[in-house]
Amino acid sequence: MVKVTEKFQVTIPEEVRRKLGLKPGEEVEVRAISDDEILIKRKIKKIKDPLSVLIGEQVELEIDPEKVDEITEK
């Protein structure tokens, strides 16, 4: 259970942040899904395909930020 502050802010519990791999500054989508439920969804980063940029065509791909981290750590 979390509380809403006077500025309508909430703190996402550590367990949830860790499970989703959320990092400070990362954007999330917040939607009302019923009269008493909200959905907080991690925003997928959109990046340009490097090959498409090189050939002059811009194509955006949706990539999971965790996958980007895994690839760049190797």
Image: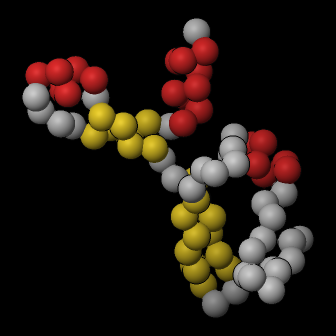
Residue 17 rendering spot, x and y as whole percentages: 76, 49
Residue furthest left as drawn: 56
Q: Residue at x 53, y 18 (%)?
A: 71
Quarter-wise, where is residue 61 in the image? top left
Residue 56 occupies which quadrant of the picture?
A: top left
Left or right, 6 with respect to 40, comes to right
Report the side of 43 relative to 4 (left or right).
left
> Can you give x and y, in whole percent of width and height, for residue 2 in the image?
86, 72
Residue at image position (11%, 22%) is 55
Depth check, front residue: 1 or 52: 52
In screen coordinates, is 23 left or right of 45? right
- Above or below: residue 35 compared with residue 69: below
Q: Is residue 20 visible?
A: no
Residue appearing at x 17%, y 21% in the figure: 54
Residue 34, given in percent of the width and then of the height, sits at 60, 84
**Residue 31 seen by the camera:** yes
> Seen from this angle, which residue lies furthest top?
74
Figure quadrant of the N terminus? bottom right
Q: Is residue 38 above or below residue 42?
A: below
Q: Residue at x 65, y 75 (%)?
A: 38
